Amino acid sequence: MALVELLMPKLGESVTEATILEWLKKEGDHIEEEESVLRVATDKVDSDVPSPYAGRLVKILYPVDAVVGILTPIAQIETSSSNESTATVIATTVSTVEKIPATNAVQTSSTSNPKDERFYSPLVLNMAREEGIGAEELARIDGTGQDGRVTKKDMVQYINNRKSTPTQETITVVVPAPQVQQEVVRPVVETKVTPQTASLPTIKAPLVVAGAQDEIIEMDRMRRLIADHMVMSKHVSPHVTSFVEVDVTNMVLWRNRIKATFQKREGESITFTPLFIEAVVKAIKAFPLINSSVDGTNIIVRKNINIGMAAATPSGNLIVPVLKNADHKNLIGLTKEVNDLAKRAKAGQLKPDETQGGTFTLSNVGSFGSLMGTPIINQPQVAILATGSIQKKPAVLETEFGDVIAIRHKMFMSMSYDHRIIDGALGGSFLKRVADLLEAFDPTREI
């Protein structure tokens, strides 16, 4: 007999901890090798944790809803392998990864460094939201966790100190306007100043009161995470959105002509999404700054082109699986991967790493019947493209015999981009390049 420790596995790049959602086994249960023992959640995706050994679950070390760091022991399993020593063995589901040593050292204040790339657990984000702590204030909290991460203990201590520290009084200033026929008083201006955000006004959500007949539905965990991420994105990046209308008639007619043959030969249905991704990849190569991130005052231009695509989950929320190195795949490869990721997203079967590392995102709002949209940037990316529904419209065409009106397949595209580094000329030029590529689609293309 040997006693081994099941560790919280590494669940993708930049993920340092996970929340335990459910124990699928209870103490005393037998576990087969590679059988799922528990289900965990990160800010990206839910995932099952399998056991690398067969044996009996002796002890569960953390309860449901606990937030646990990666490579931390979460359970003990008794194995029957005669080759194992009776000493405790550290077993991890991630090969060649060593356990990260814990540290009690308090990190230096981040106030002098406005850049903040730390991971915040759902628990910490919920505490911040409940206390009205914004992103900039959160970035100034000293973290004692691994890599300076803010823990629950840090938040409790900070909130207690914050409540005990007196803030400056609210100043109400009433400025009268010049006398005309009667005295007119200008609107009251209120300024709230706290020690943490001395130069910024306090921003709080409006008070909402539910009526007697209203239904109150609590957001699920994924919706709360999405809400936090969207608010953060709008706070971090000044958003600008450009629009263009595209004539995709050649692409539509080509797909209609080949889709039955493609299905029979490849065993896959071909949608418009891989065609859009193919055009986006070509445009990124012409305008590489679109494929970048902002790090303080530095611009990081990504060499890998990893395209995220928004997909629906069983709960109705959206998740963004990522096609890694999309520029290395042909149309058939893109189609197969798009279909696979979309299928597993709907079934809730995506792996954590499959939602990480995106450098540009595509959102097909047309699949919901929308003509166009103003998408929110998926941080830390700097741009996101939305494709609207394709509709038949009368359009003016120039021919050698003069202008004619014809029925064409038209679609609106919109792109939101980070105005800190992408101005209207670059954003508009990129969007126009994608449109030109789609309009120039070869209707005689072979598959």
Image (tube, helix red, strand yellow):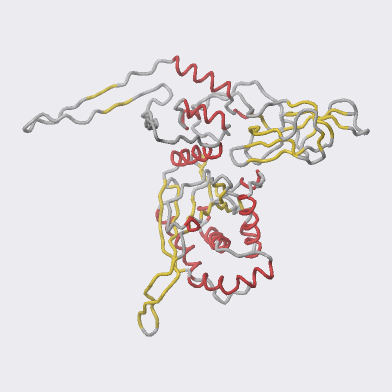
Q: Quadrant of the N terminus?
A: top right
Residue drawn 51% across the image and 36% down it? 219
Tell me which corner region of the image, top left, top right, bottom left or bottom right, holds residue 205.
Answer: top left
Q: Residue at x 37, y 74 (%)?
A: 396
Q: Nearer the viewer, residue 418 or 62?
A: 62
Quadrant showing the C terminus:
bottom right
Residue at the extreme bottom of the image, as rendered: 401
**Of 338 and 237, the residue lying toward us:** 338
Q: Position of residue 119 (x, y in %)?
A: 58, 34
Residue 233 in view of the camera: yes
Rendered position, 113 above or below 338: above
Q: Which is more toward the observer, 2 or 294?
A: 2
Residue 147 locus on image (x, y percent): 62, 30
In this picture, is 97 found above or below 321?
A: above
Instruction: Judge whether 189 appears above or below 441 on screen.
Output: above
Give left or right: position of 48 versus 321: right
- The residue lying furthest to the right in this view is 82
Where residue 66 sits: x, y (%)? Answer: 64, 28
Q: Is residue 140 left or right of residue 12?
A: left
Residue 442: quadrant of the picture: bottom right
Percent x, y for residue 368? Answer: 48, 55
